[in-house]
Image: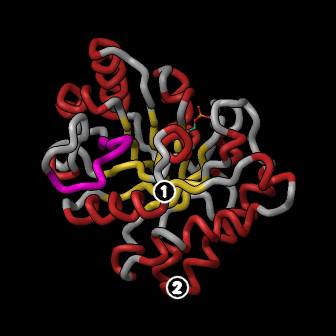
Amino acid sequence: MKYIIGNWKMNKTAPESIDFMRKLSSFLMEDTYDFNCHVVIAPPVIHLPHCFQFSKEINLAAQNLAAEDFGAYTGEISAAMLSEYVKYAIIGHSERRQYFQETAVILNKKITMAFKYNIRPVFCVGEKEQDRELGNYFNVIEGQLNETIMLLPDEHLSNCIIAYEPVWAIGTGKTPSLAQIEEMHAYIRKMLVLKIGKYNASKMPILYGGSCSVKNSSSILHQNNVDGLLVGGASLDFMHFKEIIECSDTSC
Ligand code: 13P
């Protein structure tokens, strides 16, 4: 079962999000729809209540959650509040790390909050272009995992979804080669096998994200160890996103 997660980031008005969700939910309800896929949308938080009316067909994710439980944190949204609407939360996205200075300490608090309120983390890791050029990318990803989700008790780690999103591939139209994607996913899987054993590691979804498009999604999804996609820009257009979902059908 593949995961196709659309991360809308800071895009779409309320009417635009409802229109998209209505189209997506009709598509997923069609008799002919029989794809092997969990479809998840991460809308801006203010649209979650509107989008929730479609939650029978479409799972929802938060793009972020507060590191604290409740209290005097102006502007923050807690995991408890989000848990009324979402099953998933994206944590550790490179944009949060870069623009909001989210460090491993903060990310670990967010992961704790997610589990406290039964929200499944979609935990993002990714190397910068310079790390790729210096051949340092395995170390970077290993470090990002070791200082965060690898510290979790095994039952929580096993419940995480990992998204490999090379920073240089996000929003740039550049993607790693299929061999590079497969190599990194296999590396992450190997780390998980060492930590939680082959059976549990094989069940953990490892998604790819970064300039996924209608053109490249099918081939990326068919790589070993790629269990789905975290789609940014191409998830904003219903027709593009629908075609990406169709790629998750194993026959295509
Ligand atoms: P793009 O698909 O726009 O490159 O964004 C990827 C991403 O950051 C998803 O979280």
Q: Which residue is mark 1?
A: 103
User: Magenta residues?
Assistant: 59-70
Q: Secondary structure at mark 2?
A: helix
Q: Nearer the viewer, residue 251 or 44?
A: 44
Q: Nearer the viewer, residue 178 or 74?
A: 74
Magenta: main secondary structure: loop
Question: How far across and down, in percent of the image, does residue 199 sit?
Answer: 49, 83
Q: Amino acid at mark 2?
A: Lys
Label 2: few (<14), some (14–19) or many (≥20) C-alpha neighbours in 10 Å:
some
Residue 187 sits above or below residue 3 on the image? below
Q: Is residue 29 magenta?
A: no
Residue 215 sits above or below residue 88 on the image? above
Question: How far across and down, in percent of the image, does residue 232 sit?
Answer: 53, 33
Question: Which comes before the other along the chain, label 1 or label 2?
Answer: 1
Q: Which residue is mark 2?
A: 195
Label 1: few (<14), some (14–19) or many (≥20) C-alpha neighbours in 10 Å:
some
Question: How far across and down, in percent of the image, does residue 174 sit?
Answer: 76, 35
Q: Secondary structure at mark 1?
A: loop
x 39%, y 82%: residue: 154
Residue 146 sits above or below residue 7 on the image? below
Question: How far across and down, in percent of the image, does residue 94 sit?
Answer: 55, 45
Q: Amino acid at mark 1?
A: Thr
Q: Nearer the viewer, residue 122 or 132?
A: 132
1 vs 2, front mark? 1
Evaluate if marks 1 and 2 touch, with contact meaning CB atoms under 8 Å apart.
no
